[in-house]
Image: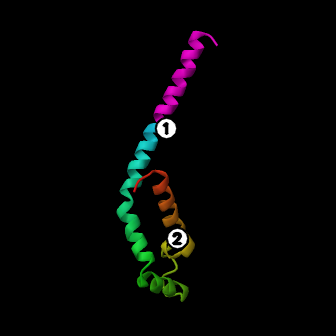
Amino acid sequence: MNRIERITHMESLFDKSTEVIHRLEQALEDFAALKSDIAELDAYYTSPQWRKDFEADEAGKLPQDLKRGVLSEDGLWNLLEDYRRLKEATCEK
């Protein structure tokens, strides 16, 4: 690899690394901003109200066109677990 090729290659690595780091910084800021939303979802999921809403859905008492992923036991539980796992991985306590 000659000097021009080396510098060009290193510049490519530099650009790629800079872009990834900027995206990660933004993602970490977005993740930190979720804290209160996740706390609200967790409180809802562990409340009697969630169970009542879930049972109403199971009984067909909710409109068919209502988006209700939050009533998916696995979906919401997985989201909360993913959040906890990522929180530990990012050392955000």
- Residue position for label 2: 77
Q: In the image, is 17 to the left or to the right of 43?
A: right
Q: How many numbered marks are there?
A: 2
In reply to whether residue 24 is colored magenta, the answer given is: no
Secondary structure under badge 2?
helix
Residue 22, x across and y down, in percent: 43, 38
User: Which three-letter amino acid code belongs to the residue tagged 2?
Assistant: Trp
Task: Note whether 74 is above or below 31 in the view shown.
Answer: below
Residue 69, x across and y down, in percent: 51, 71
Q: Residue at x 47, y 35 (%)?
A: 19
Within 10 Å of the Cα at label 2, are there few (<14), some (14-19), or many (20+) other Cα atoms? Answer: some
Relative depth, front residue between 92 and 61:
92
Q: Looking at the rendered structure, which numbered label has been put on residue 20?
A: 1
Residue 13, x across and y down, in percent: 54, 27
Q: Residue at x 52, y 79 (%)?
A: 64
Relative depth, front residue between 71 and 28:
28
Residue 20, x across and y down, in percent: 49, 38
Q: Earlier in the sequence, mark 1 or mark 2?
A: 1
User: Which three-letter amino acid code belongs to the residue tagged 1?
Assistant: Val
In reply to whether residue 12 is colored magenta, the answer given is: yes
Magenta residue span: 1-19
Farthest residue, direction right: 1
Q: Residue at x 48, y 72 (%)?
A: 70
Q: Residue at x 47, y 56 (%)?
A: 88
Secondary structure under badge 1?
helix
Task: Note whether 82 is above or below 15 in the view shown.
Answer: below
